[in-house]
Image: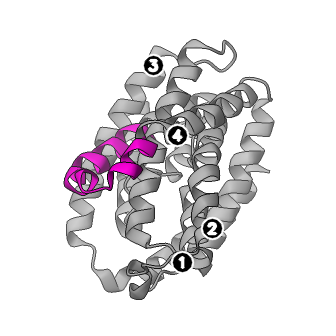
Amino acid sequence: MTPMISFFIAAIIVGFVTAGLKIQFDRFFAIILLVFLMGVSISHAINIFLWVVFLGAGSVLLKNREKIKGIPAQNKKKFLTVIPLLAFTGAYFGSFLFASVSAEALLFTVGVLALLYGLRLSLVHFKSHEFEYKNERPMYQKACGLAGPVVSGFFAGFVGTTFKSLKIPFAVRIGRMNLAQVYLGNTITAFYASFFAILLHMFFFEKNSMAAGDVLLGIGLWAAIHFSYEITNAFFKDQWRKPFQIFIGLVLILVAFRFF
C-alpha cells in the first residue's frame, strides 16, 4: 500500500468514526492509524496529530464565534489570561517529558489512554437533560477551571491528546456542569494547549522535535479528515450514534493492547 493511499484511508476512517461520535477536534484515533496504518514513528505521529487538534479546535471556535461573543466579560478575561497561562504551564512540562522518555514509554502511554477512552465510550453515554444543567457544583467548577487547562496542556505536550474524552464526563457527571458550555470551554483550552505544544515541540526541544514534514502532513491530514467528517456527518442518523459509540469503544479497548 502506497503512503498516499494509506493517508487517504486513515483520513476517511478518522472522519467517519468522529462523525459518528460527533468529535470535531481531539480525534485520538488518528494517532493509532498514523502508527499502525501509515507506519509513522510515535513521536512524529504525536507531532502530526497536534495539528489535527489545533486546526480542529480552531474551526469549532470559528463556528461558535457568536457564542463566544456572548460569554460574560469576567469569563472572557480568564480565557485570555489565566487559561492560556495554565495551558502553557502544562504544555511545557508535558513537552519536556515528551522529549525525555523513550518511544516505548510514549507507546505505552498512548495504549493506556486508548484503553481509558475505550472504556469511556463504552460505558458513559450522555442524556438530553445533561445539556441543560444550570446549577453546577462550585467546588468542581473551580477545580475544572484551574486543573483542566493544566491537564490538557500536559497531555497535549506529552502525547498530543488534550484528555477531553475523560475531562468532560467528570465535569458533567460529577460537577453537574452544562455539557454544551463545558464542550466550548474545553475547545478553547484545547486550542491553547495544542498551540503551545506545537511551538514547544518545534522550537524548544531537540529530541522528537517537530519537522517541516510533520507540519505539512498534519495540516493535510486535518483537511482530509474534516472533509470526510462533513460528508459522513450529513448522512449519519442520531439513532445509530449510541450503538456506534459502544462499538468504537470496544474496538479502542482491543487496539489498546497492541501498544503494550
Mark 1 is on which residue type? Arg
Q: Could you say which is closer to the camera, residue 56 or residue 136?
A: 136
Q: Quadrant of residue 41?
A: top right
The numbered disc on residue 82 is 4
Question: How far, Cα to Cα, is label 2 from label 4?
Answer: 17 Å
Would you place residue 62 above or below residue 125 in this image? above
Tag 4: Cα neighbours inside 10 Å, few (<14), some, or many (≥20)? some
Would you place residue 153 above or below residue 29 in this image? above
Of the numbered discs 1 and 2, the one sitting upstream in the chain is: 2
Of the numbered discs 1 and 4, the one sitting upstream in the chain is: 4
| Residue, disc 3 | 213
Q: Quadrant of residue 105?
A: top right
Tag 1: Cα neighbours inside 10 Å, few (<14), some, or many (≥20)? many
The numbered disc on residue 176 is 1
Residue 92 position within the rendered picture, expressed as x and y whole percent measured from the top left: 65, 28
Of the numbered discs 3 and 4, the one sitting upstream in the chain is: 4
Q: Magenta segment range?
A: 53-79
Would you place residue 39 above or below residue 36 in this image? above
User: What residue sits 68% from the left and 48% below the top?
Assistant: 110
Circle 3 or circle 4, nearest the eye = 4
